Amino acid sequence: MFYYLYSLLFQEGGSLSFLRIFRYITVRAVLAAITAFVTSLLFGKLVINQLNSLSFRENIYQDGPKEHLKKKGTPTMGGLLILISILVPTFLWGNLGNRLIWICILSTIFLGILGFIDDYLKLIRSDNKGLSVKVKLWGQVALGLAVAVYLYLNPLHIGQLWRYATGNDYTPFVTTDFMTKLSFPFFKYLLVELGVLYIPLVIIVIVGTSNAVNLTDGLDGLAVGCVMFAAGTLTVFCYLIGNWRFSQYLNIFFVEGSGELTVFCAAIMGACLGFLWFNAFPAQIFMGDTGSLALGGALGVVSVLIKKEVWLLFIGGIFVMEALSVILQVASYRYRDRKRIFRMAPLHHHFELGGIEESKIVIRFWIVAIILSLFSLMTLKVR
């Protein structure tokens, strides 16, 4: 909204010339993060009270650590607060004429609705069976397919080569030819042409990230804190990749229009920080699938749009480890005569059953997430 206010009212030297600050992505990104954080704080108590009045409270079952039984009755579906805190600043500070913003907004809303239905069914049935695994998975695949097909048929303008223009200036040479190419960390010129296989790649990234964040959401503040660090890293990525001067200096893909995703990622970061205010140990509210599916999907979609699909393995390393622990545990149990690798999966439960306090596990996972974020940023230059 404020972006258009600048476009409509700004006149050089006029009384409203201060509106020119809304032209800058960095300013709008900072304001989006602050707005998201403040929105979360303002509506947090209201949402918690409303969820309590509707009896939307978490049911804890014996398939988890016994210590979690004391969390029974904590309001759930707090992902609604996260969604509000992301969407409000995005609409206020984002350029809604940018199609990449809309891909992120619609994807986040779709997965939020899918998670909401799952959470709601669990509550009204008073068990841990919401949507069936197949229905939930097909919903995520449908979104991934929609995003993949759209980008395949309407490719982004991407540049990696630059030509000399006038004076000391350079102009990016952009093309759609790079859309289906996959790049890798540490390798400057290694590009793999996927062709039509680009479509299943996008589906895997979006579905995998969405489910991985969902699996990580098992301890107070764990998932939302790790998403916050990942979103912060993607905020930097989006700004650098959307600015052709920085992308030229770093010799990375320039993606036309992706700079605007800086605002969206900053909103996610602010929303997570605000939600953490209430979700930190001991949690006053849980995000539920409403939040975890939406946040994971948002990270996956952004990584696809900025052509950093492989980098997401590092940026979201905690989510990768949590998902892998479940996959390995299930495979071992099935094919090794019911032998387990971990005490319990996902990985954070393994450490819980090892006697480590919940808050200590969360903080240590955050530390690893920060290190992985710094490592991911380093890969932009070390190539």
Image: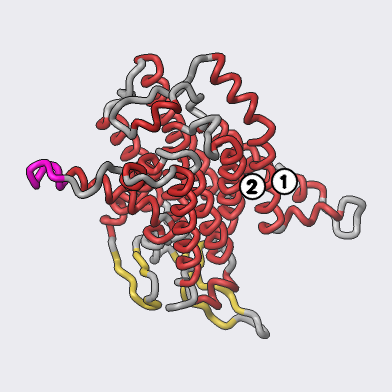
Pick the quarter of the image with the N terminus.
top right
- Res 123 → quadrant: top left
96 in relation to 111, above or below: below
Front label number (1 vs 2): 2
Position of residue 101 measured from the top left corner of the image (x, y, whole percent): 55, 47
Q: Position of residue 341 (x, y in %)?
A: 20, 49
Q: Is residue 97 visible?
A: no
Instruction: Give residue 194's position: percent from left, percent from top.
Output: 28, 62
Identify the mark at residue 139; answer none if there is no mark: none
* Residue placed furthest toward the bottom: 167
Indicate left or right for 77 with 346 as reference: right
Q: Residue furthest front?
A: 355
At 34% from the left edge and 44% from the top edge, which residue is drawn? Answer: 207
Q: Neighbour class for label 2 at 10 Å: few (<14), some, many (≥20)?
A: many
Does the magenta segment cover residue 332? yes
Q: Residue drawn 44% across and 59% down?
A: 368
Nearer the observer, 324 or 156? 324
**Which residues, given as a range, are shown in magenta?**
331-339
